[in-house]
Image (cartoon, rainbow, N blue to C red):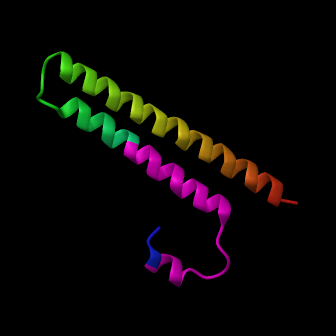
Amino acid sequence: MSPAHRRHRAGPPDPAGGLREHSATLRSHALRLHAAAEALDWRGPQADAFRAEVAALAERCATAAGGLAVAADQLEETRTP
């Protein structure tokens, strides 16, 4: 969320919503990383090693996104009477 958007939002910040936004951003980064690695024209052992590193980073982003989504769900459960 942009700082300008935060300034115009009414009411207190929603922690669960913020976690979901971060989760969505991380998922988007993971998808872009996968796509960028696949689109490389570079070939050879170094290219394969680079793609493996990018894939590992993308997987960590996706895992973190999942964790943030679970945390947001748990936060909402604790706030709901």
Residue at the spot 53% in from the left edge and 49% down from the top edge: 23
- Residue 71, given in percent of the width and then of the height, sits at 68, 47
Assign the magenta stretch its main secondary structure: helix
Residue at the spot 34% in from the left edge and 28% down from the top edge: 53
Image: magenta residue range: 4-29
* Residue 17 counted in the magenta span: yes
All told, the count of numbered labels is 0
- Residue 40, given in percent of the width and then of the height, sits at 16, 32
- Residue 49, given in percent of the width and then of the height, sits at 27, 21
**Residue 38 drawn above or below residue 1:** above
Residue at the spot 32% in from the left edge and 42% down from the top edge: 32
- Residue 77, given in percent of the width and then of the height, sits at 79, 52
Image-quadrant location for residue 47: top left
Residue, far right: 81
Q: Is residue 39 left or right of residue 51?
A: left
Q: Is residue 66 left or right of residue 15?
A: left
Q: Is residue 80 left or right of residue 36?
A: right
Residue at the spot 44% in from the left edge and 71% down from the top edge: 2
Residue, far top: 45
* Residue 9 counted in the magenta span: yes
Between 67 and 57, the residue placed more toward the observer is 57
Residue, far front: 46
Quadrant of the image containing the C terminus: bottom right
